[in-house]
Amino acid sequence: MNSKQPTYRDIAQQAGVSIATVSFALRNRSKVSEETRRRIKTIAAECGYRPNPMVTALMSQHRRRSARQQMRAIIVSFSPGWMPEAAGGHSTLSRFRDGERTACEETGFILEGMLWGEFEESARRVFARLRARRVPGVVFRGGSVPKWCESGWDNYVFAALGSPLRNFNAHLSMADHYGNAWLVMDRLAALGYRRPGFVLERSLWVNYRALSAYMGWARINGYEAPAPLVVDHWDREAFLRWFEGGRPDAIVVSSGEPIDYLKVAGIRIPEDVGIAHLDLDDSWQHLAGVRQNNFEAGRAAVHLVIDQINRNVCGIPEHPRSMFITGDWFAGPSVRKQER
């Protein structure tokens, strides 16, 4: 018998769902269907999963104490250009929110949402609302605070979620883009791919962390990888010229355009070339790659805020901490074992 206590991640991998779904199912949250909840609980029981009674008792005690203190944590969301999931976009924002809400529920805080657009570029209105609601801590999403609201945060604790703030120092929780790209390269190599290529958009700064991992991995492991393709905007002809010249046997991507170009050109996936995506949506089953653990990133951001509240530390940190959350490899049908 395996003496190691199974984790949410272990159960999620067996069930083929996200870690957030496992968390909701085991806590009987309504976000999960009854059928999925029963299936996850069955897998958890078969794995030997048992809640830690000491942790459960401590969290219950903390929730009761926090409820008596009537403390609130508020989430400030500023995310221009991110399409809401309801409109057909990626699930990143909803997973962030689920993780933030879970962390608040675990610790007795209340999660609220705010949008910068509500305040008509008035910092006075922002801080008036925070004071009225007695908000001790804030999580910033979107990578920046509007210039009209850059100052005035000395009496608050805060953390950034998803990307570093460009305005001032803040503790940070985000996906481990470097580690996730390294994981992708490891998995492609294990499948027998020997010439993986890499394509990225210049405008997405997080891609450079992944590019650094790609180039470092290839050098350390002695692979003759094609030169990466860096584009300012997607162009089918330029991509296909790169593909024909480099002849990669797999391509690491972070968007869908290269996949569309390959299909139009009659290049078969995975028969002619494998595809590994660096940011799979939790619902995607047709591609291999990494599912970024945005639920845990949101959860960690709130815990960074609560830690500062508990230590009574306010304002811009002199030495900010960063938490990089690893993702999970999903072995989708866009890659396959190579025969050599």
Image: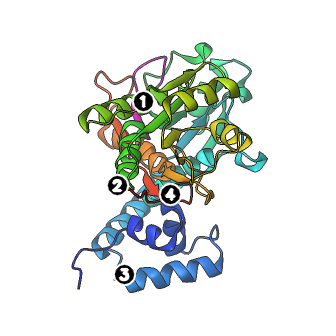
Q: Do the residues labelled 2 and 3 touch (CB within 8 Å)?
A: no
> Viewer-proximal residue, 205 or 84?
205
Dot 4 crowding, Cα within 10 Å, few <14, some 14–19, many 20+: many
> Would you say the magenta stretch is mainly helix, strand or loop?
loop
Q: Residue 102 carries which label?
A: 4
- Write down the region rendered in magenta: 165-174
Q: Is 175 inside the magenta-drawn segment?
A: no
Q: Which amino acid does label 2 sit on?
A: Ala
All told, the count of numbered labels is 4
> Alpha-carbon distance for marks 3 and 4?
24 Å
Compared to residue 259, the image places residue 43 above or below, namely below
Distance of label 2 from label 3 (alpha carbons): 27 Å
What is the C-alpha distance between the residues marked 1 and 4?
32 Å
Mark 1, residue position = 211
Q: Where is residue 146 in the image (x, y as percent from the top left)?
A: 60, 19
Tags 3 and 4 in contact by the CB under 8 Å rule? no
Give the structural element (helix, strand or loop) at label 2.
helix
- Residues tagged 1 and 4 counted as in contact (Cβ below 8 A): no
Left or right: residue 2 compared with residue 260: left
Nearest to the eye among marks 3 and 4: give it: 3
Which tag, 2 or 1, sits closer to the chain's start?
2
Within 10 Å of disc 3 (Cα), the crowding (few <14, some 14-19, many 20+) is some
Q: Distance between the residues labelled 2 and 1?
A: 20 Å
Q: Name the residue under label 2.
A: 190
Q: Which residue is drawn at 47% across and 22% down?
A: 153
Residue assigned mark 3: 47
